[in-house]
Image (tube, rainbow, N blue to C red):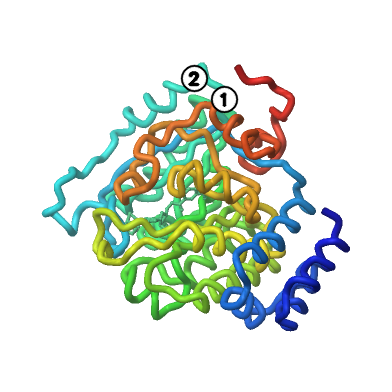
Amino acid sequence: MKLESINALIESSIKDVKLVKISKKVLSKQRISSEEALYLYNNGELGFLGVLANTIREDRHGDKTYFNKNFHVEPTNICVYDCKFCSYSKMLREKDDYEAWELSEEDIYKAVKAYNDSDITEVHIVGGVHPKMGLEYFRNLISNIKAIRPNLHVKAFTAVELEYMARKAKVSYKECLQILKDAGQGSLPGGGAEIFDETIREQICKDKCTSSQWLEMHEAAHSVGMPSNATMLYGHIESYEHLIDHMNRLRDLQDRTGGFNAFIPLKFRNKNNQMSDIEEVSVIEDLKVFAMARIFLDNFNHIKAYWPMIGRKTAQLLLSFGVNDIDGTVDDSTKIYSMAGAEEQKPVMTSEQMIKLIKDVNRQPIERDSIYNELNDYSKVELT
Ligand code: V47
Ligand code: SF4
């Protein structure tokens, strides 16, 4: 639909003058303030937010929907921290009925070699913060992985893991990241951001890196030429104000560095963790959060829905609410979310399934690499 028609439709159907004013700003690509975002959150109906978010999405990307071919390595679930939402870490909560694991280096190399004959382009390495796995261990690990498969993009370590590594090794964030980059690391995933507001962070993950440290780490990564993603854990004890504050801090940093590739809202799942008494939010709320992200984060090119967590059906819906990326084919190699009660207990999707999922909602499946170069356009491929 043409922009003028959308504007006319909004003017004729929305009676709230303030909402119409904000929507005009959004549609003419002007940045909205935190106050305006809060007003939208509180007063904009889902369909209205969807139209705004989808208009921006289609203006930037048309129907293009990105995915990549990746697998995950989780070296350990042993962690020195005790985030209340975490269903995965083992150490402080000995009574849990699942076991701690610690992959040996050989296990990890074997996992990488297992993909030798596949066209996978990325390995995503994250895990618990193990007191004995430090910078030197990971530098060596990455350079050995690159020796096995030089073209594999290594997206590794949340800012939480990196902050611990740098502190233990007594090096600055920049030095730490440069060492990892020289070993072959290509980018950083977006984990560990949770909610930046300090009062919320205090209640859900008070012992790990602070919000400022998270932001400083990503700024340092961008300064040494490593792009990164940013996440936001929503749907627990936070309010809309906290979500907007979180995105605002990211928008400010992105203005300075331009180093973020994608923003990934992560829905809080309540199984097997210390916040299990909190009910999960509805799909309606999911759609709102993603739409608001697309509307507010005018300097983030990609809004990603992580399908193993949010589920395939909601991921499809989200493609009309601002999302233009649904992560990777992901092999059955991640446990973080299945333990937390994610939709996907066995997160495996073949390329064919991924392509079908995207085509079924009339979007254009594009395989990308880790830094969003387009590798294959599957829109013309006939599936059997
Ligand atoms: O920071 C932990 C989240 C994150 C739960 O950058 C939970 O491409 C919901 O950041 N319910 C780590 N979420 C994973 C991550 C990620 C995932 C996929 C792609 C990328 C990327 C990054 O997982 C943690 C935390 O926010 N998490 N427990 C839970 N119960
Ligand atoms: Fe450790 Fe990460 Fe779990 Fe927090 S979310 S306890 S840092 S593994």
Q: Is residue 211 above or below residue 221?
A: below
Q: Amino acid at mark 2?
A: Asn
Relative to the observer, which residue lies in front, 15 or 199?
15
Is the residue marked by circle 1 packed among few (<14), some (14-19), or many (20+) residues within 10 Å?
A: few
- Residue 242 can be seen in this image: yes
Residue beneath the point at 32% across and 47% down = 133
Give the mark nearer the N terminus: 1 vs 2.
2
Question: In the rendered image, which quarter contains the C terminus?
Answer: top right
Which residue lies under the disc numbered 1? 352
Q: Is residue 263 left or right of residue 337?
A: right
Is the residue marked by circle 2 packed among few (<14), some (14-19), or many (20+) residues within 10 Å?
A: few
Which residue lies under the disc numbered 2? 116
Mark 1 or mark 2, which is nearer to you? Answer: 1
Q: Residue 207, labelled with which disc? A: none
Relative to the observer, which residue lies in front, 153 or 368?
368
Q: CA distance from mark 1 to mark 2?
A: 20 Å
Residue beneath the point at 57% across and 44% down = 316
- Residue 299 can be seen in this image: no
Res 247 → quadrant: bottom right
Relative to the observer, which residue lies in front, 264 or 42?
42
Give the secondary structure at mark 2: loop
Find residue 208 and report its horizontal and vertical position in percent: 35, 66
Relative to the observer, which residue lies in front, 328 or 198?
328
Find residue 110 and report its horizontal and vertical position in percent: 37, 24
Q: Is residue 194 left or right of residue 374?
A: left
Find residue 54 and report its horizontal and vertical position in percent: 70, 56
Q: Is residue 190 above or below residue 248?
A: above
Q: Is residue 36 above or below residue 207?
A: below
Residue beneath the point at 39% across and 27% down = 111
Residue beneath the point at 69% across and 68% down = 256
Find residue 135 and report its horizontal and vertical position in percent: 40, 50
Q: Amino acid at mark 1?
A: Glu
